[in-house]
Image (cartoon, grey):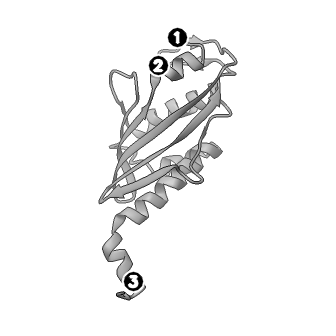
Amino acid sequence: MINLPIRWLGIFLGSWCTNSDAEGKLDDAWNARDWDRFDAYHDSNAVVVYWPGQNDPTRGGHDHRAEAIRFCNAFPDNRVHNQPYDILFGDGDFTCFVTRFTGTFTAPLELPDGTRIQPTGKSFDVLYSTTAKWENGKIVEEYHFYDNGTFLKQTGLA
């Protein structure tokens, strides 16, 4: 067995430890609806976010925060189950997790164009994954994955 000084651990693990720790803190902020802390983990000028079923990605921190707030207003009990994640790994400037995402559609969902979808009172429970690219401790690209068909069916939107 080789014993290495603890300071070397950072050399071998690099930014992955920092980024995966930040990923957990970002999802803690989402779950707490702490939007200032949520913003702190996204590059406000460069973040590009890809969602299932969305034709074009969301661009910029302001628009990403706005869509997050709209979603959380409509699904106020939604939660990313990140304590612990089912799977969390990374490589260099990328992190990826897999976990459950749950919530209940109990308030109107406002779309970016102002259209409002009335709540159904139905819950969702889907397997959810995010892959993120990090630069200087902030996300610059974020890819969300879940079965959108299952989400729509469970929430009564399909």
Between 18 and 36, the one lying in front of the other is 18
Left or right, 24 with reference to 94: right
Kind of residue sitting beneath label 2: Gly
Quarter of the image for residue 147 reads: top left
10 Å crowding of disc 3: few (<14), some (14-19), many (20+): few
Q: Which residue is mark 3?
A: 7
Instruction: Please state the horizontal and vertical placement of residue 157, each as a whole percent of the image.
Output: 55, 13
Instruction: Please state the horizontal and vertical placement of residue 78, each as a whole percent of the image.
Output: 63, 34
Which comes before the other along the chain, label 1 or label 2? 2
Above or below 131: residue 146:
above
Marks 2,3: beta carbons within 8 A = no
Callout 2: SS: helix
Above or below 70: residue 43:
below
Q: Which residue is mark 2?
A: 149
Kind of residue sitting beneath label 1: Ala
Q: Which residue is mark 1?
A: 158
Marks 1,2: beta carbons within 8 A = yes
Kind of residue sitting beneath label 3: Arg
